[in-house]
């Protein structure tokens, strides 16, 4: 346990839009977090956010941030390909670390990072934003306390038309990708969230099968001029079998009409069913509905004020609402030594499922988990 009034020194690497809309408001709002530093390769970008959110120092080299003795926890909020090397550098510097997802493209690398963190004695958390939705957390409590009974089906759906317009710049393209081959994209950017949520509800995956497809043949890609003919995966559907015996279904899409983030989780059990819809509509961030075998018409559930971080309501923009919750949980885990949740290991298990779905599509078959090459037993 820590002394009363202890604050956790935080250093954020990356001063882009997601840091501004989600991560940094979370630290600014929580009195147990001390925003020590922001680092970005563009000093003006870092300086602007430092002034906006009250960071004490600005760095342009992440190594300087890692060497700052006041920084106890590092937040990696940078482009995808940098997540793993920056997270490993933070671990090796003895810092607790939060990384945006995915931690790595290959689950083996994510498992390696999880093991390194354990050996170093530092805490980790993956930026699975939607675990920290009040509605999702209530569904998980209903599962844990038996309210929903034995879980039969869990469906994770992502209905988001963010990239339906070919002129809207696509960001999830790995460096050096072969544009002639189908490039996993929505299943990585959005599927990793859903696979984590579904695993949180139903337990570990036993086997998956998936189908991936490109629907928009030409589009603008960040870093390139004009329209690019790119065979990027715009949508994936998958089925899953779980060790528990439950069934799962997944849909992730760049082009399914709906408002961002477009996440919906449906859980059906022997005693009840719940639907958490994380779609910002009419100024409301999310809705939660519940039904039972003797009252099959779904009714809306209103959560108590205590379900929301102080200063937020259902009308708070979802990135800030969820990330305030995520920040509070991680800071408390570190300062109070409470049980870890949503760690690098969970990120690795999600990535393992992503990798298995991609493999199943390419080989046109069911793929069993854990994948043999990860060398990890469930």
Image (cartoon, rainbow, N blue to C red):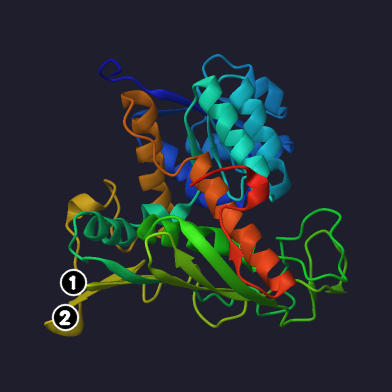
Name the one closer to the observer, 359 or 11: 359
Q: Is residue 78 left or right of residue 3?
A: right
**Could you tell me residue 155's position as x and y percent?**
42, 72
Q: Is residue 260 left or right of residue 216?
A: left
Dot 2 crowding, Cα within 10 Å, few <14, some 14–19, many 20+: few
Residue sitting at 87 percent across and 63 percent down?
A: 178
* Quadrant including the N terminus: top left
Name the one closer to the observer, 119 or 221: 119
Judging by the rendered image, the residue that carries numbered circle 1 is: 271
Secondary structure, mark 2, is loop
Name the one closer to the observer, 249 or 55: 249
Q: Marks 2 and 1, how far apart in space?
A: 7 Å
Residue sitting at 71 percent across and 83 percent down?
A: 215
Judge whether residue 45 can be spotted in this image. no
Toward the bottom, the furthest residue is 297
**Residue 214 vertical placement versus 130 (above, below):** below
**Residue 123 vertical placement versus 165 (above, below):** above
Q: Is residue 63 left or right of residue 291?
A: right
**Could you tell me residue 299's position as x and y percent?**
19, 78
Dot 1 crowding, Cα within 10 Å, few <14, some 14–19, many 20+: some
CB under 8 Å between discs 2 and 1: yes
Judging by the rendered image, the residue that carries numbered circle 2 is: 293
Residue sitting at 36 percent across and 59 percent down?
A: 201
Toward the left, the furthest residue is 294
**Could you tell me residue 72's position as x and y percent?**
50, 22
**Residue 164 vertical placement versus 269 (above, below):** below
**Could you tell me residue 265's position as x and y percent?**
39, 69
């Amino acid at each position: 346990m820590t002394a009363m009034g202890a604050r956790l020194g935080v250093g954020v690497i990356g001063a882009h839009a997601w840091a501004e809309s989600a991560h940094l408001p979370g630290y600014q709002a929580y009195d147990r977090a001390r925003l020590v530093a922001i680092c970005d390769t563009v000093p003006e970008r870092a300086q602007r956010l430092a002034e906006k959110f009250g960071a004490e120092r600005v760095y342009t080299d992440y190594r300087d941030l890692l060497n700052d003795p006041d920084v106890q926890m590092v937040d990696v909020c940078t482009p995808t390909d940098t997540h793993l090397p920056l997270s490993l550098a933070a671990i090796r510097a003895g810092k607790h670390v939060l990384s945006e997802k995915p931690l790595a493209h290959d689950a083996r690398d994510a498992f390696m990072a999880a093991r390194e963190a354990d050996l170093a004695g530092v805490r980790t958390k993956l930026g699975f934003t939607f675990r920290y939705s009040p509605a999702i957390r209530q569904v998980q409590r209903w599962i844990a306390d038996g309210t929903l009974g034995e879980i039969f089906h869990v469906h994770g759906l992502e209905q988001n038309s963010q990239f339906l317009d070919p002129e809207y710049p696509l960001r999830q393209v790995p460096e050096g990708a072969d544009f002639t081959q189908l490039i996993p994209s929505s299943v990585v950017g959005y599927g990793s969230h859903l696979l984590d949520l579904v695993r949180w509800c139903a337990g570990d995956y036993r086997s998956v099968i998936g189908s991936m497809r490109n629907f928009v043949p030409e589009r603008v890609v960040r870093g390139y001029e004009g329209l690019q003919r790119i065979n990027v995966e715009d949508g994936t559907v998958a089925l899953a079998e779980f060790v528990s015996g439950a069934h799962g279904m997944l849909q992730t899409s760049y082009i399914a009409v709906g408002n961002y983030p477009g996440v919906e989780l449906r859980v059906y059990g022997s005693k009840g069913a719940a639907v958490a819809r994380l779609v910002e509509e009419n100024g409301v961030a999310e809705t939660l509905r519940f039904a039972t075998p003797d009252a099959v018409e779904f009714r809306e559930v209103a959560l108590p004020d205590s379900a929301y971080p102080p200063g937020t309501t259902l009308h708070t923009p979802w990135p800030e609402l969820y990330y305030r919750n995520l920040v509070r949980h991680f800071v408390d885990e570190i300062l109070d030594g409470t049980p870890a949740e949503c760690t690098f290991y969970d990120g690795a298990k999600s990535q393992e499922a992503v990798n298995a779905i991609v493999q199943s599509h390419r080989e046109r078959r069911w793929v069993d988990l854990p994948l043999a090459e990860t060398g990890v037993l469930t």
